[in-house]
Amino acid sequence: MNYKIADTVFSLTTVHGYSRSRLADYVSDGTPELGIASTAADVRAERARLGQDGSDGFIEFLFVQRKLSDYLVGKDTLLFHGSALAYDGNCYIFAAPSGTGKSTHSRLWRELLGDRVVMVNDDKPFIRVGETCTVFGSPWDGKEHLSSNTSFPLRAICFLERSDVNHIEPLDAQAAIPRLFAQAYRQEAADKILRLVTKIADTVMLYRLCCNMSPDAARLSLEAMSGASAEEKTNRRVRYDL
């Protein structure tokens, strides 16, 4: 069976059915440019590599994610840990370490805006990096499986921090690049990932949001990020070395 994610068609052969069921919304009749195949031995090796519990089918699903992500880095596309949603035709990503509240903040946006919001991916969207950045849905979408097979231009990335008082501020590229790098999937391509996240920092709006879990926090971030004009983004081209 062939599938298409982030404008890339690939064939997939797996031992278990879990990956195929999760990829059902991404079936494609296009010609594959990549083949991904797994064996029982690959699943055992992936489990040992991750040190993670879960069914063999789930571990195989993570194997497929790794193989696809490694390939897509070569196409200037990275897997990013964040909750991505689209509003009025633009995508916004909320990023933070696990458990900080990015999924909760996305839920507050959905409650505030209703069907004006499209949930792109609640955990691991793909970002294609170029003169503009584009966010793609993927089936690796978190515990609630909130995602869609769609894509939108990326307008802003917001890094969340817990606080009793809601406050949002622009984040300059120098401060944002280590945070972007920390949320990007990477194996052996650290130098390439660093170049991609530096390009993201040069291209999209970046924010730091200190927030609680109230609807007021969502109103604040919505007003700041959707209301900012492109001209407000200064030239922030930087170099950041590991």
Image (tube, rainbow, N blue to C red):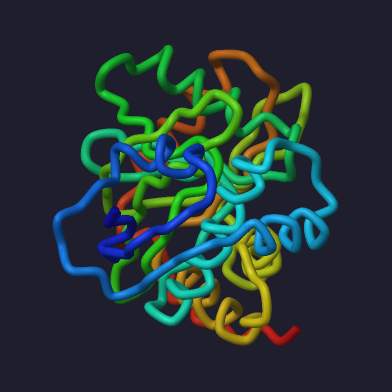
Q: Is residue 236 visible?
A: no
- Quadrant containing the C terminus is bottom right
**Image quarter of residue 204:** bottom left
Asked if 68 appears above or below 61 in the picture, the reply is below
Q: Identify the residue at image location x=26%, y=17%.
A: 115
Q: In the image, what residue occupies the spot 61% across and 33% down?
A: 102
Q: Nearer the viewer, residue 35 or 192?
A: 35
Which of the two residues, 40 or 157, is positioned nearer the viewer here? 40
Image point (40%, 14%), residue name: 112
In the rendered image, residue 44, in percent from the top left (x then y), is placed at: 74, 57
101, above or below 178, in the image? above
- 168 to the left or right of 18: right
Quadrant of residue 54 within the rendered picture: top right
> Which percent across, then down, holds residue 186?
64, 70
Furthest residue to the left? 29
Answer with left or right where residue 126 lies relative to residue 31. Answer: right
Residue 227 at x, y percent in the picture: 34, 39
Identify which residue is drawn at 47% across, 39% down: 17
- Residue 140 visible (yes or no): yes
Task: Give the x, y percent position of residue 132.
Answer: 29, 68
Q: Nearer the viewer, residue 206 or 96?
A: 96
* Above or below for 95 versus 214: below
